[in-house]
Amino acid sequence: MRLEPIKNPSLAHCLLPPAIALGTTVVFASLLAMVAGANPFSVFGLILSGAFGSKFAILETLNRATPLIFTGLAAAVAFRAKFWNIGAEAQLYSGALLTVLLGTGLLQWPSIALLPTIALFSILAGAILLLVPALLKTRFGVDEVVTTLLFNFIFLLFISMLLEGPIKDPMGMGWPKSARVIPEARLPRLVEGLRLHWGFALAIFSAICIWIIQTRSTLGYEMRAVGLNKQAAAFAGIPINTVLVKTALLSGGLAALAGFSEVAGLKGNLTLDLSPGFGYTGIIVAMLALLHPLGVIVAAMFVAGIFVGADSMSRAADVPTYLADIMLATALLLMVLAIMLTRFRVVRD
Amino acid sequence: MEIIEILFTASFWAAAIRIASPLIFATLGELICERAGVLNLGIEGIMVAGAFAGWMAVYSGTGLWMGVCVAMLVGMLFGTLHSILTVPFGLSQHVVGLGVTLLATSSTYYAYRLALPEVTSPPKIEAFQPFNIPILSDIPLIGPALFAQTPFTYLAFTLVVVVAVVLYRTPLGLAVRAAGENPAAIAAQGLSVTKIRMGAVIVGSGFMAMGGAFLTMSAFNSFFFEMVNGRGWICIALVVFGSWRPGKALLGAVLFAAFDALQIRMQQTSFGSHVPYQIFLMMPYVLSIVALVVMSRRAEVPAALMVPFNKGER
């Protein structure tokens, strides 16, 4: 078989493959639910109602979507330039670390000064953390996939070390957790009485900023050019390595904001289970959003909904919650295939 | 000097060889994929799936070698998925690889929860036992280190020789290497690049799953979450370190494992007790990155690695 580009794809040709991909994902998940001895219709009903069925559920989903928007943006920005940052997990923890370092009493400032300062330092921490793999790539040609992945393990051990040493909460009954941040370092709630904090607004704002950068700035143009064709970009005089480093700084900073938002907005302190793999899930979010910054917002809510819904479904229907991860991984693989099939036709030899 | 003493004990080298064994399987698997031109980032998840499949098979009553076969088949299944998406469809090997890792890991955890819903500590199995090779195992130092291992470890070393011979001494090996260097030449010979690459990814994934199975069937004798713990990613670094050659990759795996065994023993020395244990646990990952940087200058990367081949396209 061969692949042939489709000259002028019709609307049906653009919509059908993604629709089939989503349908196949649902059928596959239904089969797995049946293997677990559950009725697939009630499983999907429970997931939907658990994710969007009540005010509480929706707020929970939006809360879960917040870090995913940040990590999804981090992946989307980097992948657009074909810089494979798989280290968002570590960068997230670097942001969280800076938040507890500065927010637990070191700086006794009012919120209006303290929160932006912490956010800025978090961004710096994430950017610097990703700078190392970026420079290893541009200077030595070391593949960033492996280095960023390995950095996740190294940095989590580093956090674990700090949590059992210098930043351990003396009042923590011996648990490896940090002290709580002071009230001035907490992100206030968006609406009084509703469990949703300003981190969500910051995430939406970041997505819009990235969208503007990508469509309206020279850097955005250069990042796309480097991602599409390195040789052509170099020929056009774009400094590839500089663009890659800038991309890395941006991507790392975005991922770190997820950590800042989780600690300052939701958890209040740093523990080793701050992130249940938000960094890795961000990759799925970015791919489902087709790397579009505004699409990341929608994709993050969809993915967060599946996770939140699966949690409550798992309690009610006794189907392991890992069904959510399987669905997302399947959706990711099938969507990548479907998007390709909207532009290419399979031809038999 | 405590370190010197450690380096001259047979138990240290026996541990190093034991730690190296799963890495050898998975590194060989990744090496085959990359030699044919496909980066397989599914390795981490495929190892998880292999670890579970082999252990579960033995737990449900099959023989040990049958368990290894089951693990291998499960690995080949995920390899088939990976190869269909990356080879004929030419999709991004990064995205598909990560997707396969996520899918393999989550479906393994799902299966584990379904198979053993109530357990808090996973059951142990009757795993592979060390087998002393007569005469050879009596050699001081080398004997207990190399020739008193489990048959699964002997298989790892045998496989290195087999893969090396096939890659460098057979037409099949030539075709695999050419598929990763110059696929157009393969197509000009009338051979199918698609079939060769898919075959390499499927077989390679089978080896990765065997590496995972080693953990449950010859090391920990039980399955628990996060047990693969980045070993797959380390194996990708080992392939680069070994310049895509089986012999050098074996050397890299053993060196790496020796270092790993050393850091475990260092933790128990008087010096080690003053250092946070996390520093020691970081060492394998740091070492992998250092190895990548050091080798990057003279790495002979397969020329067509990560380049999809679409027949008739220039």
Image: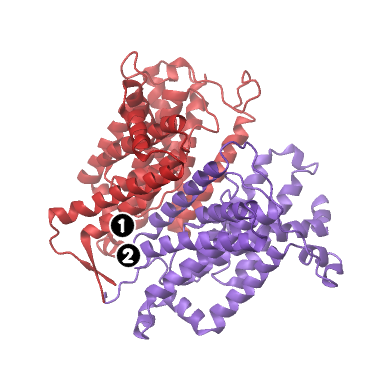
Chain colours: A red, B purple
Residue drawn 34% across the image and 13% down it = A193
| Res A122 → quadrant | top left
- Label drawn at residue A87: none
Q: Position of residue B221 (x, y in %)?
A: 68, 51
Image position, residue A175 (x, y; %) = 63, 25
**Helix, strand, or loop for circle 1?**
helix
Instruction: Name which residue lies at 25% across and 59% down.
Output: A341
- Percent across and percent down for residue B93 are 39, 60
Mark 2 — residue? B89
- Badge 1 vs badge 2, beta-carbon distance below 8 Å: yes
Instruction: Give the mark count.
Output: 2
User: Dot 1: within a 10 Å radius of its alpha carbon, few (fewer than 14), some, or many (20 or more) residues?
Assistant: many
Q: Is residue A130 placed above or below B148 in the rendered structure?
A: above
Nearer to the camera, A93 or A6: A6
Q: Is residue B191 left or right of residue A176?
A: left
Identify residue for label 1.
A337
Q: Is residue A85 left or right of residue A229?
A: right
Secondary structure beneath label 2: loop
- Neighbourhood count class around disc 2 (C-alpha, 10 Å): few under 14, some 14–19, many 20 upward: many
Residue B30 visible, this angle: no
Kind of residue sitting beneath label 1: Leu
